[in-house]
Image (cartoon, rainbow, N blue to C red):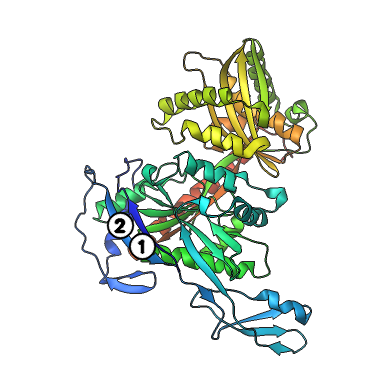
Amino acid sequence: MAAVVMSYYCKPSPFLGHFPSYLVSLLLLAKSSSRQVAGTAVQESKISALFWGSKKSVEPKELDVSVSLQDSILTGSGLEVIFDGPTEFGIFFLLVLAANSNLVGFKFRGGLEKQITPKRISLSIISSISEVSSREWDACNLDATGPDKFNPFLSHGFLSSLEESRSAVKETGWMPSHIVAKDESDNVLGVVPLYLKSHSYGEFVFDHSWADAYYGFGSRYYPKFQCCVPFTPVTGPRILVRNIPFRDQLFDVLVSALKDLAAKSQVSSLHITFPTEKEWHMLKEKGFLQRIGMQYHWKNHNYKNFDEFLMDMKQSKRKNIRQERKKVSTQNLSMKRLRGYEIKASHWDTFYSFYRNTTDNKWGTPYLTRDFFHTMGSKMGDQVLLVVAEEGDELVAGALNIIGGDTLFGRLWGCHPKAYYPSLHFEACYYQAIEAAIELNLNTVEAGAQGEHKIQRGYLPVLTYSCHYLIDEAFRKAIEEFLVRESTQVKLVMKLIHDSGPLKEGVK
């Protein structure tokens, strides 16, 4: 058993879009004499506000929630595992299920049955990823993705860099609350990156209007649980389980633990953002609402060089790209791609100033600290690719990329605050990334969230996924209807873009 005391700062989010009026009407109609919270009927909370108005700041306070995750054992009745293989290997199918799921025994094809002594897996919440060794965490990540699809953002090196640099910590509204599953020998079999959040910033799946609707009805949306990689809109597994015979069952255990934790902690909701499509479907069966989004990715069709890629573009788009690249060369700018040891501390210091220039002009608040870049660069080595633009001996712009198993992930961009270089953003972020992917024989370039301007440069829309578990049944029903309508719109936009895309007919 493990217990934690969680704290939060309930800071109201700014109003970023209207909660649809028909949903507000649905919420009014959804009022009933009781609400179902995590399967248990509880007395309905009194609605104290039915209006939109200015929000007053709320002082930080402690949310004293003694939370324990129940160890899972194999006892009782209910689950039967069929093992098709030698009897002597059946023992490896021992599984820990949630408290409400049990194992009667094993049945081996051929009629032989054998009762197995149950084993126990312990579940715990940790307040820092440093409580798990990098070897054990990364083993879970590698087994969850496979080496060909390795996701560097789920690595211990990346996540610990966020914590050690004070970028994703309690004080910034990201309180680490990772879940760890261990067997009786203290081996880590599964991990879940999880954060208790006091706001909705840095997620890239927008629910600010949901928070506003909660507030309008006198309810509290924050704190909430967020299962994700902070500040990183990159698809990847979120329930990281070792490659063991009972991994699907352990997946179920961890999802049940997440839902139980949300209910016991009295938070409004639990959100799993940018999971894989497979997880997205599995989580629907566990009671999560499904949401889709859209990003723009470039696909490598076994191109030998950039010009070969251009030949797959429509003539007008091909001409535009060539003109943009020519503008960069005529400005006496030189482009370099640096990796690992080639990136010095001075590069990170300069790039941080570029990053601050971008955040100051666009978002207002930087998510990442200067220390993050130094720490992350040191820990991740050759997985880091920094594209830089130089004018003479001076660094004037940069784009940060991370190399995965089969994908190049474009993350951040910035430039000198006192200079303007036409088309440099497109060169550094998109064209250099394409060249690097071809050179490294990578299948995909993911260039981050949003940005319709990417389309005419060869980046086409793909679906992204998120899953949402809301405790309040009335809000859940209203948001579920909203998500159905939103999904229809997203799919329509994707179809229109593909139908009028930048590639020649027949190129997908």
Q: Amino acid at mark 2?
A: Leu
Residue 490 can be seen, yes or no: yes
Picture layout, residue 164 above or below residue 419 = below
Residue to which mark 1 is pinned: 265
Locate residue 205, reporting x and y percent. Answer: 46, 46
Give the percent coordinates (x, y) of residue 174.
41, 47
Q: Residue beneath label 2, please?
A: 63
413 or 485: which is nearer to us? 413
Residue farthest toward the front in the current orientation of the protein: 185
Q: In the picture provided, is 234 more to the left or to the right than 90?
A: left
Secondary structure of the residue carrying tag 1 is: loop
Q: Quadrant of residue 343?
A: top right
Q: Nearer the viewer, residue 364 or 114?
A: 114
- Against 486, residue 371 (above or below) is above
Q: CA distance from mark 2 to mark 1?
A: 8 Å
Q: Left or right? Give the position of 385 relative to 365.
A: right
**Coordinates of residue 384 in the picture (x, y in percent):** 64, 34
Q: Residue at x 63, y 47 (%)?
A: 151
Q: Dots 2 and 1: beta carbons under 8 Å?
A: yes
State the quadrant of the C terminus.
top right
Amino acid at dot 1: Ser
